Image (cartoon, rainbow, N blue to C red):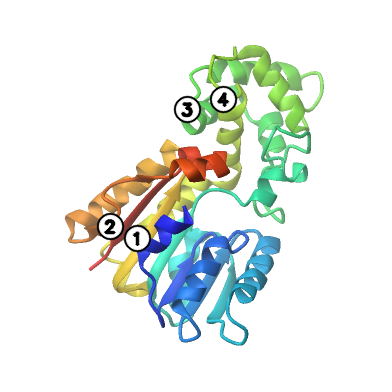
Amino acid sequence: MPVEAIRMLSPAPGETYVDATAGLGGHASLFARAVGPAGVVILNDTDASNLAKAQANVRAACLPGQPPQIHAIHANFADLPWRVSQLGLKADLVFADLGFASNQVDDPARGLSFMRDGPLDMRLDASKGLTAADLVNNMPEHELTQIISEYGEERLASRIARKLVQARATGPISTTGRLAELVRSVVPRSGGKIDPATRTFQALRIAVNDELGSLEALLAGLGASRRSEWLETGCRVGFLTFHSLEDRAVKRAFAEGIEQGAYDVSGGAAAASEAEIQANARARSAKLRVVRYS
């Protein structure tokens, strides 16, 4: 939702823009042109390869010789408030697109999708942490059930976990195709378009990357006691979410800010236009929330 994000966050020349999830730099390129050569763009991403691409794309999107000052941070956005303050800067604009870059989803080596078979990884930062295969093949059944139920909001979580534990007893579950096959074998396909394996994949990805824990840490940085450390007065903050667990956390944090005097720019959650959904089916579940802190 780039058009809506620019309109609601209203970047101005000379401002400091913080992109919590730089991806390939799509949103950041638009904001970079708006803040201009007198502005600052801070790109943050846990994917080092994409972060480098984002820097190049942002520079290429600006007029020759007129890019803003650019800072790149390779880190989880849980640390973003501290990282920005360490640069000696304060943000006028903060934006977090909680979706994934197309090259991450479409790369079978990442293991984020079951559309093409690949290793069961799912890490956004491939240099550290446990993989989805580690969880599926070693986690106790009750813990698998809990993850799939809570993070995937899957009502048949216990049935899926039991099947995975039974299957791994005869050999490790190491590919996305195998995992999807096992889930589909115990979850009936409904009349909708959602694949039976979708919720389980979402749950494991969230667990592998501690997505909700990281989001809560970033949202904590918007609290009244910490805002002044890294946000300018009047800072506009936007989150683009793609599932209910993310959106509920953002909605709750923003509601607290509004109670303390922040202004709800988006009037609740804004949805993608039909035109954007036609061009990008992933936008169907997107919700954009923006507030301005006083």
Q: How crowded is mark 3: few (under 14 residues within 10 Å), some or many (20 or more)?
A: some
Residue 42 position, x and y percent, is 51, 73
Q: In this view, does 187 lie to the left or right of 245?
A: right
Rendered residue at 76%/19% (across/down): 169
Q: Name the residue under label 1.
A: 8
Tell me the element at label 3.
loop
Kind of residue indicated by mark 3: Glu
- Measured in 3D between alpha carbons, the distance from the residue under mark 2 to the one under mark 1, in whole angstroms, is 6 Å
Q: Is residue 3 left or right of residue 181?
A: left
Q: Do the residues labelled 2 and 1 touch (CB within 8 Å)?
A: yes
Q: Do the residues labelled 4 and 3 touch (CB within 8 Å)?
A: no
In the image, residue 25 sits, relative to residue 268, either above or below, namely below
Rendered residue at 47%/66% (across/down): 80
Kind of residue indicated by mark 4: Ile
- Residue 163, labelled with which disc? none
Kind of residue indicated by mark 1: Met
Q: Do the residues labelled 4 and 1 touch (CB within 8 Å)?
A: no
In the image, residue 155 sits, relative to residue 211, either above or below, namely above
- Measured in 3D between alpha carbons, the distance from the residue under mark 1 to the one under mark 3, in whole angstroms, is 31 Å
Q: Residue furthest front?
A: 275
Tell me the element at label 4.
loop
- Measured in 3D between alpha carbons, the distance from the residue under mark 4 to the one under mark 1, in whole angstroms, is 31 Å
Tell me the element at label 2.
loop
Q: Mark 4 points at which residue?
A: 194
Residue 263 position, x and y percent, is 22, 59
Nearer-N-terminus badge (3/2): 3
Q: Closer to the camera: disc 3 or disc 2? A: 2
Q: Nearer the viewer, residue 128 or 206?
A: 206
Nearer-N-terminus badge (2/1): 1
